[in-house]
Amino acid sequence: MTDRKRTTAIQVRVTEQEKRKLERQARRCCLSLSGYLRRAGAGKPAAAFPRQRFHALYQQVNALRDNLATQPMERTAAQLDELAGQILTAYTSGGADDGND
């Protein structure tokens, strides 16, 4: 809805390399390039989504699911607690450890 109210454009000259980097950063934050630049210009954080880390955690969840019937409930509960902590850490890290610039 707010996009319809945006009628003023700002033109900025960048190199092709700078543009690709900005687009890549915007994608990592799940934002359009315009949205990413608006957030950056307003001094608001644009957290990157740590894809590699979340993928690894996703695989751990699947492995845990596959072992539900074969391991004691206490062990499953402990593993779920550990995964919850890892997911929270990955979510709050802002993608700093993702390794994809």
Image: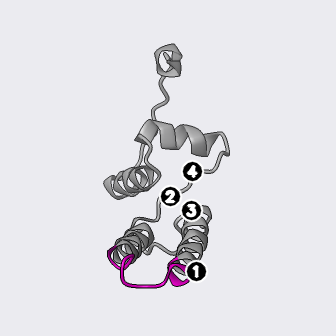
| Mark 4 closeness class: few <14, some 14–19, many ≥20 residues within 10 Å | some
Cβ atoms at labels 2 and 4 below 8 Å apart? yes
User: From mark 3 to mark 2, how far is it between C-alphas?
Assistant: 9 Å
Pick the residue in front: 24 or 49: 49
Residue 66, x across and y down, in percent = 32, 75
Give the residue pinned by disc 4.
46
Residue 50, x across and y down, in percent = 46, 65
- The region drawn magenta spans 66-76
Q: First in sequence: mark 2 or mark 1?
A: 2
Q: Is residue 66 above or below residue 27?
A: below
| Mark sitting on residue 48 | 2
Residue at the location (45% across, 32% down)? Answer: 11
Give the residue pinned by disc 1.
78
Q: First in sequence: mark 3 or mark 2?
A: 2
Give the residue pinned by disc 3.
91
Q: Amino acid at mark 3?
A: Tyr
